[in-house]
Image (cartoon, rainbow, N blue to C red):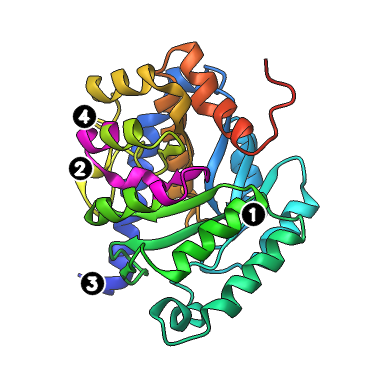
Amino acid sequence: MKHLPLKRLRSRTACCCALALLFTLAGAPAAATPPVPFIDAHVHLNDPQMQLALMDRFGVERAVVFWGGRSSNESVAQAARDHPDRFIAFASISPERRSYQPAWRGNGDANALLAELDALLASGQYRGIGEINAVHFESAGFAETDYALASPMMDGIMALARRHRVPVMLHVESTRMAELSALLERFADVPVIWAHGGYTPLILARRMLAQHPQLYYELSARTWPRHPRSPEFTLLRDGRQLWPEWLKLIEAMPERFLVGTDASHRDPVSEQMKFASVQNFLSQLSPAAQARVGRDNLLRLLGLDSGLR
């Protein structure tokens, strides 16, 4: 018997798992139901054409886009210029990019990096800052980041958000909740989109939302049937149905949640699973919550809400 190399075997296994999840989420009965319109709050724009095709297929009107492993602030801005009715660009100086790390570590020129971000925002091409991975657990192809939130770099980012009146998408895991709370208190007038909600349990989600009115709990990757880093990261109890307690919280505070896919365009089957998972999640909300969580909250946050009541 011929054995596949380990890397290829893992890739094939991941593809098969993603395909099975896609069939589970987008089976024949669901396929006949029109998709719930939504705006994707979390996309690493590595392949604009794949992203547009997925948006057309899964009912996505617009998407907040920022760089990933194969893109840049410049390429994201160009994509938004090419498709102004579909893409909303954010600018990032996140520390996983090697050239930015010295400034984050304190042995580089933080002021120069903040000036770069200031210039990007002043160009008028970006409607937000992020994703900023200040505290991010290790994952496949991504080394762990763990930077203090009480720092000149984070304060500088938040001050620029205040000056340019834009939100910040911030990735902070539950290991630094006290620091995150302190940051939010120092900049209580700056809207913060909490990427993946820090993968926090329900009790911390409720507490943080109650304490910080400017905090938006963004649900990308939490609607997936399974998460590759930890089974606790999904909000689904059986790969499809929301835990009743999470549903109750979202329905009680629909104005504080956003949806996203965390698309990165590595594999078409995996990306389809991400989009189908958001549709599955939205289908379980009341119509009023669907509208707010799916699109209205983000439009208002970005100042694009002129057509809303």
- Residue at the spot x=55%, y=23% of the render? 35
Residue position marked by numbered label 4 in the rendering:
237
User: Depth-wise, is mark 2 or mark 4 nearer the camera?
Assistant: 2
- Residue at far bottom of view: 107
Between the C-alphas of marks 4 and 3, the distance is 36 Å
Residue stretch rendered in magenta on the structure: 184-206
**Residue ranking furthest to the front:** 186
The amino acid type of the residue labelled 1 equals Arg
Nearest to viewer (mark 4 / mark 3): 4
Q: Which residue is mark 1?
A: 163
According to the picture, the residue beneath numbered tag 2 turns out to be 232
In whole angstroms, how far apart are the C-alphas of marks 1 and 4? 42 Å
Amino acid type indicated by mark 3: His
Name which of mark 2 and mark 4 comes first in the sequence. Answer: 2
User: How many other residues sit within 10 Å of disc 2, few (<14), some (14-19) or many (≥20)?
Assistant: some
Q: Earlier in the sequence, mark 1 or mark 2?
A: 1
Which amino acid type corresponds to the residue marked 2 in the rendered image?
A: Glu
- The residue that mark 3 highlights is 3
Task: Count residues near mark 3 (Cα–Cα under 10 Å), then give few for <14, some for 14-19, many for 20+.
Answer: few
Q: Is residue 302 above or below residue 73?
A: above
Q: Is residue 47 magenta?
A: no
Question: Secondary structure under badge 3?
Answer: loop
Q: Nearer the viewer, residue 43 or 274?
A: 43
Which residue is situated farthest in the top direction here?
287
The answer to whether residue 112 of the structure is visible from this angle is yes
Identify the residue shown where x is 49% and y is 12%.
287
* x 48%, y 47%: residue: 271
Q: CA distance from mark 1 to mark 2?
A: 37 Å
Above-or-below relation of 85 to 50: above
In the image, 161: left or right of 1? right
